[in-house]
Image (cartoon, rainbow, N blue to C red):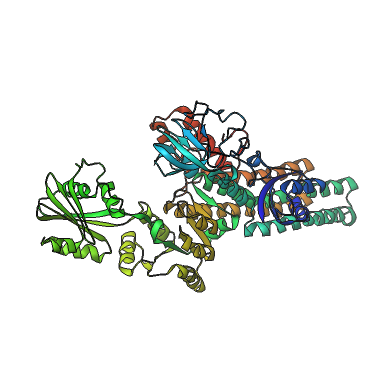
Amino acid sequence: MKTSVIEVHAMLSVWSVEEVEKRIGEVPGVESATVNHAARTATVRFDETRLEIADIKSGVRQRGYESEAPAAASAGESHEANMAPGAPPASPSPAPKTAPAAPVAAQAPTPVAPPSAPGATPAVGDIVVIRPGNKIPVDGIIESGDSLVDESMLTGESMPVQKGQGATVAGATINTNGSFRYKATKVGADTALAQIVKLVQEAQNSKAPAQLLADKAAQWLVLAAIGVGLLTFSVWFWWIGEPLLFAVTLTITVFVIACPDALGLATPMAVMVGTGLGAKNGILFKNASALEDATKLNVIIFDKTGTLTLGKPEVVEMVTADGIAEDVLLIAAAAVEQGSAHPLAQAILRRASKLTVAAPTGFKSIDGMGAQAETAAGTVFLGNRLLMDTQKLSLGPLEAEAVRLQGEGRTVVHVAQSGRVIGLIAIADAVRPTAKAAVAKLRERGIDVVMLTGDNAGTAKRIAKDLGIDSVLADVLPGQKAEKVKELQATGKKVGMVGDGVNDAPALTQANVGFAIGAGTDVAMESADVVLMKSDPYDIVAAVELSRATLRKMHQNLAWAVGYNVIAFPLAAGVLYPFTLSPEIAAMSMSGSSAVVAINALMLKRTKLAGVHPPGKSAAPQARQSGRPARIRKRRRDAATLLSNGRISDDHRLD
């Protein structure tokens, strides 16, 4: 099955929504269709082996409605078929070629046309040269060079991200100062941006449970208007005996003042604004149900590795002997670890990256224990406790510290220099900077936080204590994670699950709302209901806040729509006679009612929410301070507008 989004015009009111869905569903091969009256679009799920998107649009037109592919699919028939949004389709090439990413000459044996020319869009496998200020055309992996890349339009982060060999880059992001060459891996509808646009449009077209009720109520409202109108005519003309013109005028006023549109737009307008605001802040809701269900969560389970932690070892603590500075300890350890690819060695080298470390001599690896090397300050031994014992090096006062660090589940690296143990380096999976604040905020909002991990209880409890988490589920096998979610649900809890790995996918699916970290696996993101593009646990707080604010707007809009019609019907029917409403006033009231619903939904953009930045305020100040070229700031604002609206127009081409 394939899912695509098409535009549907000529819908007179929300009364047409069910009819359009029914008509599209009658096309052979279509499994389901969901229409968004506010956006004038329909999300269609169909069997691509039986028909194409063109057949669906033709079927829609035959049934009296106009249809075309939305702007986001202007380069093809659907999201699944187009190339880089807004760019001409690329011709497949039998061999990789080198193409520039902007109208500049490429350093390649065979020059090619700039991207603005037909056929210049890179294909999968092409090598692309990126220079300072260039927009990256498609997703890929850097093969040589390094630079800072502005990814704010995808993640909402204002600070550029350092990219080097082996790092992934996303299409439509902006290269700032360096140059690099990268191989295109994803183009067209497969790029990160195209997938985000698709998710946003599908979320906006999906229906929250409250909207299903509102749609039914809107249909009954039309019937109620007809019934009240006929009753008004009967009472005034036949029972009271007023003139025919007076009775007909009041009847017309009743018909005109009824506003099913306000009732039908109450929920989708709020959903559109909420999902758009979330996308601009790097929070992608896949459907409206997730937006509504997130407000009901009372327990959120965090997978530890890669979610609450960075997923790679870092130096978390250093203990030095008397008279030894931390820099001396780090320089000695880094001298031995130079050139090593071991994860623990890389952690030490990252910590010592700002120090000047001389190259050692006489390096020797000691199997199962560590290594030794000669430095200007003497012979350095670096490794585990067994190495120290073998070399008859006493820990002295550091003995108790070593026991403490090991008891906390940390890997302890012992460092000795010139025949004396000079310190201990504790290495562990470092906690994400915002994890503790995220846990605290969630607890403030009455949501219990649980940490789920396959690590031993000692390590898990240490990290949980640092983060302020009371409930820990340790020693959990990958296949048991979904069962733990079920156990909590069996107690009546509404459970959210946050994960990033393949082993988290079953639990993400089982949870009431699944949150996937954007830096995680594709399987996890496919299984989740919400994707956090910035891989920041604090975005969970933002997602919950945004969901609650959106639901409040839904309720406000529904209350207004219902209240308006409850008051409007009696006034239009003349219950306050001799005061009556004219059809002209009724028409203005009806239009004003729909306008109030739309304006109230748009006010969500100005609501101050934890972790959610209003449009135009998230990163602009920092961008101005950074001194970037004006054209880069303009491109980022254009991209932010694109995501906020959930679609790509001809003014936002990504070539």
* Residue located at (47% from left, 44% from top): 155
Taking 520 as reference, is 364 left or right? left
The image shows residue 355 at horizontal and vertical percentages of: 22, 42
Write down the quadrant of residue 181 in the picture: top left
Taking 9 as reference, is 268 left or right? left
The image shows residue 66 at horizontal and vertical percentages of: 77, 43
In the rendered image, the quadrant that contains the C terminus is top right
Q: Is residue 557 visible?
A: yes
The image shows residue 329 at horizontal and vertical percentages of: 17, 50
Taking 172 as reference, is 414 left or right? left
In the image, residue 72 sits, relative to residue 528, either above or below, namely above
Camera-nearest residue between 550 and 313: 313
Q: Is residue 577 visible?
A: no
* Residue located at (66% from left, 43% from top): 595
Camera-nearest residue between 355 and 334: 334
**How many marks on residues?**
0
Write down the quadrant of residue 628 in the picture: top left
The image shows residue 119 at horizontal and vertical percentages of: 61, 33
* Residue located at (19% from left, 65% from top): 403
Write down the quadrant of residue 459 in the picture: bottom left
Camera-nearest residue between 384 and 428: 384
In the image, residue 168 sits, relative to residue 485, either above or below, namely above
In the rendered image, the quadrant that contains the N terminus is bottom right
